[in-house]
Image (cartoon, rainbow, N blue to C red):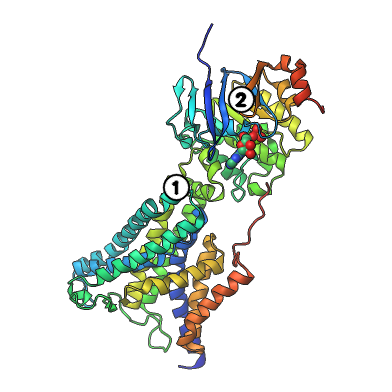
């Protein structure tokens, strides 16, 4: 591989990981946009989604050698069931942990989110200890689990050095339409407009006949579903899941959301892709041991020097 | 001939925290009227309207719209029953366009045939048509007030509550807005108008109430209150 090929390869890897991060960052930014809560449990929700995906893989008896219509249906069902599962869990999280605190100080809700994150992590640990073959037969709950390579590694660019595989293609084919649909939903549907209205002025939204609690529930479900989609793509792309993965992936996504401007949807998408690229390029050109440091440094620098992020430039509201 | 008033407010109490701001406010608004509620800053005018709109919880007393009790009706169900509020400070959605603001005004309606309603508000306030693709937050104070009124009209209310429509609006536009209120009233809309500019309010209203520290102290025909020395001294002094 020559220098250019190395660079191109890292850009591809960075973009693909970045688009997964972006899907998760959208969950942070949607919830922040509507109730100004940093939902610290969101990364761990994605982890639970990944365990759900692995459980389904066991249930459908899928593995790298699976083929035929049944395997395709099983694979496709991951993309439906896991997002639905994560949407449901996120809805429940709001109902049980956040909604009762709607008029409490922001810090209370934040602490509630951190508590929920611990609960999710421990649920993941418990889940990983289930006596399933795929989970290691209940012996090592905390051990990383192999996620079968259901998507091939064939290079779509032929025999060259630079690889763009079916897995990379999968990431693009799932994440881009999801982001497009979300953008359409928020911009053009009545419910999307109601969501923006609640975010901008909840009292005025209620005066319009909008049930703010319902809109907030729906926002959590949409954010959860995007997280669930990210769970499946992440697992299929990286082929390893573990109960603490939500922390790392959540940190990346949260940083992405802040970098893009928390509350801004295009910001979360851009931020996700940038963080993916930064990770890949740091891995390659500096050293993997510095990658997390790099991400944290970006987080700190953005918070200090540009808290509104790249795209979160606040329009000054006239009173 | 006693008919059911469109809005009947009976000894309501409401407030924030431990304090009752409203200490038993009663008033009625009959179909087709413009009724104004005047009073000094902090008297409880906004609290009254916010309580009628379901935003500030009702602690005691009763509110009826066309004879139907509203005690257990959540705020978001009220526009569907024909009650709309143009809130104090307008509360426009600043990062939604004028059109989107208007569309959300019709959120409570089951039909999506909004074209006639857009035509209606654009003929009332042509400037909104020019600005329809602009973000609400970029409008001037007066334009935002027109948008707030239009947004409320999009729900096709029977009863419109208005909180200080003249606040922060240039004098020329205040005149235009009050003319529009009268025009809307002539076409059948019932209005409960809160104003600090008592002179202006009493000139357009049929009847008026004066509120002082959470209680109604005077109730009369608006024209009579304009001549009432108590009102002149307290609220019309500097005009
Ligand atoms: N959100 C609030 N929280 C606490 N007190 C409030 C709030 N809004 C108004 N008040 C108090 O309630 C009283 C009545 O206020 P308000 O209804 O806004 O009066 P008005 O509209 O007549 O000027 C005032 O003493 C005011 O300080
Ligand atoms: Mg007021």
Instruction: Find residue B89 and report its horizontal and vertical position in percent.
Output: 65, 40
> Tag 2, which secondary structure?
strand
- Hey, which residue is sitting farthest top in the picture? B1
Name the chain letter of the residue that bears numbered label 1. A
- Hey, which residue is sitting farthest right in the picture? B238
Q: Is residue A133 visible?
A: yes
Say which residue label 1 marks.
Answer: A215
**Rendered residue at 42%/61% (across/down):** A113
Tell which tag, 1 or 2, sits nearer the viewer.
Answer: 2
Q: Quadrant of ligand 2?
A: top right
Circle 1/circle 2 CB separation < 8 Å: no
Instruction: Find residue A2 and report its horizontal and vertical position in percent.
Output: 48, 93
Decide: few, some or many residues near mark 2? Use Cα within 10 Å; few <14, some 14-19, many ≥20: some
Q: Nearer the viewer, residue A212 or B230?
A: B230
Name the chain letter of the residue that bears numbered label 2. B
Q: Nearer the viewer, residue A12 or B53?
A: B53
Relative to A132, say whether B38 is above or below: above
**Rendered residue at 57%/20% (across/down):** B27
Q: Is residue B123 visible?
A: no
Q: Nearer the viewer, residue A7 or B163?
A: B163
The image quadrant that residue B194 belongs to is top right
Q: How many marks?
A: 2
Say which residue label 2 marks.
Answer: B215
Quarter containing the N terminus of chain A: bottom left
Decide: few, some or many residues near mark 1? Use Cα within 10 Å; few <14, some 14-19, many ≥20: many
Instruction: Find residue A190 and report its horizontal and vertical position in percent.
Output: 48, 45
**Rendered residue at 54%/6% (across/down):** B1
Query: How far apart are the two marked residues, 1 and 2, measured between alpha carbons?
Result: 37 Å
Relative to A191, say whether B76 is above or below: above
Q: Is mark 2 within 8 Å of ligand 1?
A: no
Q: Nearer the viewer, residue A159 or A101?
A: A101
């Amino acid at each position: 591989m020559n220098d250019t090929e190395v660079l191109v390869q890292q850009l591809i890897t960075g973009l693909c990981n970045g688009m997964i991060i972006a899907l998760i960052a959208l969950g942070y930014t949607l919830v922040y946009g509507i109730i100004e809560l940093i939902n610290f449990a969101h990364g761990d929700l994605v982890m639970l989604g990944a365990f759900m995906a692995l459980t389904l893989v066991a249930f459908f008896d899928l593995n790298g050698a699976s083929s035929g219509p049944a395997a395709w249906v099983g694979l496709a069902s991951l993309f439906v069931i896991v997002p639905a599962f994560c949407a449901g869990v996120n809805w429940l999280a709001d109902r049980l942990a956040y909604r009762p605190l709607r008029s409490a100080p922001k810090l209370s809700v934040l602490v509630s989110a951190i508590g929920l994150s611990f609960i999710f992590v421990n649920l993941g640990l418990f889940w990983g200890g289930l006596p399933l073959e795929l989970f290691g037969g209940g012996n090592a709950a905390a051990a990383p689990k192999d996620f079968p390579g259901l998507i091939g590694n064939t290079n779509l660019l032929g025999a060259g050095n630079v690889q763009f595989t079916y897995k990379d293609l999968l990431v693009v084919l799932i994440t881009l339409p999801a982001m497009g649909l979300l953008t359409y939903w928020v911009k053009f549907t009545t419910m999307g407009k109601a969501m923006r209205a609640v975010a901008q002025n909840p009292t005025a939204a209620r005066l319009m006949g909008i049930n703010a609690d319902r809109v907030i529930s729906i926002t959590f479900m949409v954010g959860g579903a995007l997280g669930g989609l990210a769970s499946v793509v992440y697992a299929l792309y990286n082929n390893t899941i573990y109960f603490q993965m939500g922390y790392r992936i959540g940190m990346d996504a949260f940083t992405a959301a802040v970098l893009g401007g928390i509350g801004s949807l295009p910001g979360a998408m851009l931020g996700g892709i940038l963080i993916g690229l930064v990770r890949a390029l740091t891995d390659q050109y500096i050293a993997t041991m510095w990658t997390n440091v790099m991400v944290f440094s970006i987080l700190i620098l953005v918070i200090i020097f540009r808290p509104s992020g790249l795209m979160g430039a606040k329009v000054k509201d006239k009173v | 001939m006693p008919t059911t008033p469109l809005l009947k407010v009976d000894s309501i109490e409401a407030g924030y925290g431990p304090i009752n701001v409203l200490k038993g406010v009663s008033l009625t608004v009959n179909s087709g009227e413009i009724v104004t509620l005047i009073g000094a800053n902090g008297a409880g005018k906004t609290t009254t309207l916010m309580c009628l709109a379901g935003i500030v919880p009702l602690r005691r007393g009763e509110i009826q719209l066309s004879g139907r009790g509203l005690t257990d009706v959540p705020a978001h169900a009220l526009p569907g029953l024909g009650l709309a509020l143009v809130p104090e400070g307008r509360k426009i959605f600043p990062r939604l366009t004028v059109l989107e603001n208007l569309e959300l005004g019709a959120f409570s309606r089951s039909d999506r045939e909004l074209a006639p309603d857009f035509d209606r508000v654009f003929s009332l306030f042509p400037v909104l048509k020019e600005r329809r693709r602009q973000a609400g937050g970029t409008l001037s104070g007066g334009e935002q007030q027109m948008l707030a009124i239009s947004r409320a009209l999009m729900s096709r209310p029977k009863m419109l509550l208005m909180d200080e429509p003249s606040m922060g609006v240039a004098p020329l536009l205040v005149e235009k807005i009050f003319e529009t209120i009268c025009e809307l009233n002539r076409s059948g809309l019932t209005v409960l108008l809160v104003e600090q500019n008592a002179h202006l309010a009493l000139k357009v209203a049929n009847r008026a109430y004066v509120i002082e520290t959470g209680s109604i102290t005077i109730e009369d025909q608006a024209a009579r209150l304009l001549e009432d020395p108590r009102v002149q001294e307290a609220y019309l002094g500097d005009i």
